[in-house]
């Protein structure tokens, strides 16, 4: 299979806002296992701003755009460097793809990016994708990396999109309420809007509403989507080996 995996900020970030290198390393191990099983993988990874925020202490006030630009510029270097070192232990080459929303409009930029991703995959290189936060601001931004990962999955004609969050999937109520049940399977055209919490994640721009919107759109394009908990040990391996017993929500295709 060709699998696009989106790793959210809440998965890669500790409660204090710093990058969780231990979890990042564990996820890299699992991606390496997927590759060993013959799967092609594209990573859409958050975490650049969190990396940059802890690299530099700024003494004067910055507005939200300046913070995003500064910390992402600093953090993207550290983030891709960590991925490079971790994947190198498995002999896996990685390539960085920084993109913007207009690159997904029909035309030359779309075709150029798709060709770049195709040649990387054909030559065994693992693409690591993130928004180009240094120039993508206000109306030019993706809603979040959920939206970006959905567009990437369609661009590379993936078989499966996996959205890793810090909860197991979509529930019939608030996940902390004992009467809430995990929705395991979602058929095309199913409306789950009444179950979706509108709150956003602590360290990212998205939330379950964003994941549901992306999953529905990508499902309609004929790509299976899985929402799962990236904080669970061996989650990626268990989704392949033991899907029946591993908590998650799957948007199935017709």
Image (cartoon, rainbow, N blue to C red):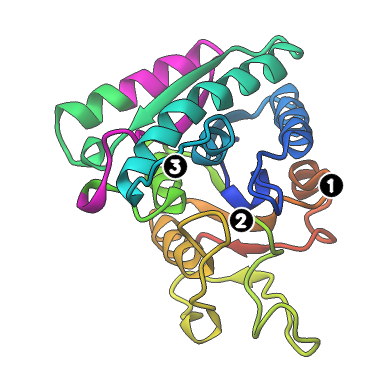
> Of helix, strand and loop, which one carries label 2?
strand
Near-viewer residue (29 or 66): 66
**Residue 21, x across and y down, in percent:** 73, 33
Residue 145 lies in the magenta-colored region: no
**Residue 16, x across and y down, in percent:** 69, 51
**Residue 137, x across and y down, in percent:** 26, 45
Task: Give the labeled residue for mark 2.
Answer: 226
Q: Residues within 10 Å of mark 2 (few under 14, many from 20)?
A: many
> Residue, x 59% and y 18% (percent of image)?
81
Report how far apart the C-alphas of labels 1 and 3 lie in the structure. Answer: 24 Å
Residue at the bottom extreme? Answer: 179
Q: Which numbered disc, 2 or 3, marks the residue that appears first in the sequence? A: 3
181 vs 95, left or right, is: right
Near-viewer residue (40 or 113): 113
Task: Give the labeled residue for mark 3.
Answer: 153
Q: Residues within 10 Å of mark 3 (few under 14, many from 20)?
A: many
Report how far apart the C-alphas of labels 2 and 3 lie in the structure. Answer: 12 Å
Q: Is residue 163 visible?
A: no
Q: Is residue 251 above or below residue 39?
A: below
Q: Which residues are magenta?
A: 114-139
Task: Give the labeled residue for mark 1.
Answer: 233
């Amino acid at each position: 299979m060709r699998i696009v995996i989106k790793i959210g900020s809440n998965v890669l970030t500790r409660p204090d806002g710093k990058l969780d290198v231990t979890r990042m390393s564990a996820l890299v191990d699992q991606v390496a296992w997927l590759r060993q099983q013959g799967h092609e993988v594209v990573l859409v990874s958050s975490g650049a701003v969190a990396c940059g925020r802890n690299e530099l202490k700024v003494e004067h006030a910055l507005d939200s755009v300046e913070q995003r630009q500064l910390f992402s510029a600093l953090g993207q270097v550290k983030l891709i460097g960590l991925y490079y070192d971790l994947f190198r232990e498995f002999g896996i080459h990685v390539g960085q793809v920084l993109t913007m929303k207009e690159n997904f409009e029909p035309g030359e930029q779309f075709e150029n990016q798709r060709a770049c991703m195709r040649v990387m995959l054909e030559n065994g290189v693992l693409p690591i994708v993130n928004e180009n936060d240094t120039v993508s601001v206000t109306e030019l931004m993706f809603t979040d990396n959920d939206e970006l990962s959905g567009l990437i999955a369609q661009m590379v004609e993936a078989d499966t999109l996996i959205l890793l969050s810090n909860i197991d999937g979509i529930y019939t109520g608030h996940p902390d309420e004992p009467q809430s049940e995990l929705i395991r399977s979602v058929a095309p055209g199913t409306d789950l809007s009444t179950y979706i919490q509108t709150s956003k994640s602590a360290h990212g721009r998205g939330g379950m509403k964003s994941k549901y919107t992306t999953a529905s759109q990508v499902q309609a394009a004929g790509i299976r989507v899985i929402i799962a908990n990236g904080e669970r040990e061996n989650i990626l391996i268990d989704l392949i080996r033991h899907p029946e017993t591993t908590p998650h929500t799957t948007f199935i295709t017709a």
